[in-house]
Amino acid sequence: MITIAGAGVAGLCVALELARRGHPVTVFEQGESLELNQSSHLAGGMLAPWCEKVSAPEDVVRLGAGAADWWAKVTEVQRSGTLVVAPPRDQAELRQFASRTEQYEQLGDNRIADLEPDLAGRFSKALFFDQECHLDPRQARQELVLQIEKLGSEVRFGEPAPEQVDIDCRGGAVDLPELRMVRGEMVMLECPDVTITRTVRLLHPRIPIYLVPRGNGIYMLGATMVESASWRAISLRSALELLGAAFALHPGFGEASVIETGVGLRPAFPDNLPRIIKRDDKYHLNGFYRHGYLLAPAMAQQLADQFEQEQMKCAS
């Protein structure tokens, strides 16, 4: 039996990867439900390696390239691409964004209107990343648990992990050298009068935002990045900036209902890349920063490979 601490996205991806390979797995999760793991629960669920390349290392593109296909075997993946726009006064931001990435198409106002009719006439230029996708993180984690259990393994909620486990995926609950917390704040909006079908990123020099459709007029709006380990509720400044950016994207959001706000702490190493660390006969998978759903599949596969190789060495 392989034991795993933590039922965030990393722990569940590792559990499923090992269970698929025929290993019995038990995941221990201290929280009583999936919703109590804030970082994974409040994520945007964007599988957007090319957009992330703007500020992330090249490894994010390499590791995230296969994420959509991996997730498609678990949950519904919306393969509708990412649209990146900027207000007229911030066109320099759009040009700078384009210079730092690739795999996009430059669009004019007519093409923008074809993709998203509700944005017609609002933006004259955009970048369209047609290979990018998004998923619903809450649905995805529920279906991860179902698949793990279907393969004969189990996820134990409300049960803290024993001191000695094989794999530790508890994020900020673990003391690892150089690991820090990055605070992210989000807002969930209900706005049936605005119809947007794909992830839209609105560029701004101070606070760029992304809007991810969840269906039925629900949109996830995020996210701030603050070097802080505070769990206090979303600040007034962050809420105003996020909501103001949504209104700048489309004035129809002025009539939206704010149905949820949230704060998550995302563990990160100095290079903002996840790491597999072997310490005291235990593997640690940690440091996903803002790329949990994008990079967890590849890192889970790497960890499963290392774990099996170690088992083979011990058996020989």
Image (cartoon, rainbow, N blue to C red):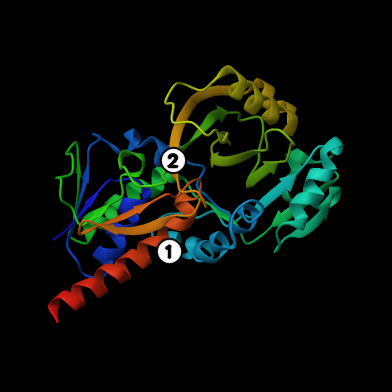
| Number of marks in picture | 2
Q: Compared with residue 86, is residue 255 higher up or lower down, i.e. above or below?
A: above
* Pick the front one: 126 or 50: 50
**Side of 298 relative to 21 (left or right):** right
Image quarter in which the N terminus is found? bottom left
Mark 2 or mark 1: whose residue is earlier in sequence:
2
Q: Compared with residue 309, is residue 47 higher up or lower down, i.e. above or below?
A: above
Q: Secondary structure at mark 2?
A: strand
Q: Which residue is mark 2?
A: 180
Residue sticking out furthest to the bottom: 316
| Residue drawn at (13%, 78%) of the image | 315
Find residue 295 and report its horizontal and vertical position in percent: 46, 57
Mark 1: which amino acid? Ala
Find residue 268 and report its horizontal and vertical position in percent: 46, 46
Q: Compared with residue 236, is residue 52 higher up or lower down, i.e. above or below?
A: below
Residue 98 lies in what quarter of the image?
bottom right
Q: Secondary structure at mark 1?
A: helix
Q: Which residue is mark 1?
A: 298
* Pick the front one: 16 or 149: 16
Find residue 169 and report its horizontal and vertical position in percent: 31, 49
| Residue drawn at (46%, 21%) of the image | 233
Asked whether the viewer can see residue 226, the reply is yes
Q: CA distance from mark 2 to mark 1?
A: 22 Å
